[in-house]
Image (tube, grey):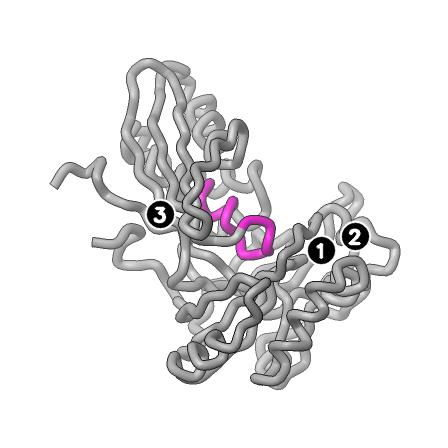
Amino acid sequence: MNEFALRWFAPAKLNLFLHVLGRRNDGYHQLQTLFQLLDEGDTLQFEPLSSGELQLEVRSNTTGQRLPLENNLILQAARLLRTHAGVPALGARISVDKRIPMGGGLGGGSSDAATTLIALNRYWQLNLGQTDLKALGLQLGADVPLFIDGRSAWGEGVGEQLQAVTLPPRWYLVVTPDCAVSTAEIFSHENLTRNSPAIKMADFLAGGSRNDCEPVTCELYPEVARALAWLTQFGLARMTGTGASVFASFAAENTAKAALSQLPARWQGFVARGLNSLEPGRYPT
């Protein structure tokens, strides 16, 4: 099989909780979170080009439209990688099938960027190790190292200090209301809680966690609050990241899909299984 025909999997993620412990001198926030990878995600294909040109085509599986994005994280990742390698003639044709809703806190852009770094490192034969790729990825976004590791993890720092975890099997109903939440707006808001105490995994398992961004996002974006309220009929509902996506967990796939069948038409939704690791491969057969 032509290796360039391989479709690389870029998973979505959930923040099962998100605590803001404080604000750092550099303006970033000190966080604690638990990242859960999902078996739902985007797929990417790569073809190296010798011209130094970087071409990108993005297709949305939800709308059927082609969405050309001139300077998204995929192109930024490719440029950063070849600059680091010192070989400006490296090029690639990249195509993306988007399944992760954009701007929902599901990590789609970061996951696509991480997959781009991993795939082009291979196709361009740069032979960079995972530590180098994670350092490059952190320049693109705090979540990118998570997706380079490809494992669900306890996250600290700005989210880049990762400890792999094994989580029990769960199915998730993820709902994305029709609004675009600004991460910068949420983290800069005066009402954001910034003094949560650090917790341990045992505290999370005992129910001692929340998403500190949720009250601010719900205040500024009432549609997120409405989606959370709707999900609450099925159990504990929580927002991922700074939103807009929200989720609830289920023990069985059929129960999650039964809830999805009742989803109001104005919202997007999907059911996904939690993954502890992307191994043995990052791309489907």
Task: Say which residue appears at 60% left-offset and 50% top-offset.
Answer: 103
Amino acid carrying label 1: it is: Gln
Name the spot of residue 64 as percent of width and height, x first. Answer: 41, 45
Number of residues whose C-alpha sits closer than 10 Å to that of mark 1, classed few (under 14), some (14–19) or many (20 or more): some
Q: Quadrant of residue 178?
A: bottom right
Numbered range of the magenta stretch: 102-114
Name the spot of residue 172 as percent of width and height, x first. Answer: 48, 73
**Earlier residue among tags 2 and 1:** 2
**For mark 1, what is the residue?**
30
Task: Say which residue appears at 83% left-offset and 53% top-offset.
Answer: 189
Q: In the picture, which quadrant includes the C terminus?
A: bottom left
Name the spot of residue 187 as percent of width and height, x first. Answer: 76, 52
Circles 2 and 1: CB distance less than 8 Å? yes
**Earlier residue among tags 2 and 3:** 2
In the displayed orientation, state which residue is furthest to the left.
1
**For mark 2, what is the residue?**
23
Q: Which mark is residue 106?
A: none
Q: Which mark is residue 43?
A: 3
Amino acid carrying label 3: it is: Thr
Instruction: Say if the magenta span includes residue 103.
Output: yes
Q: Is residue 252 left or right of residue 262?
A: left
Task: Say which residue appears at 66% left-offset and 65% top-offset.
Answer: 18
Amino acid carrying label 2: it is: Arg
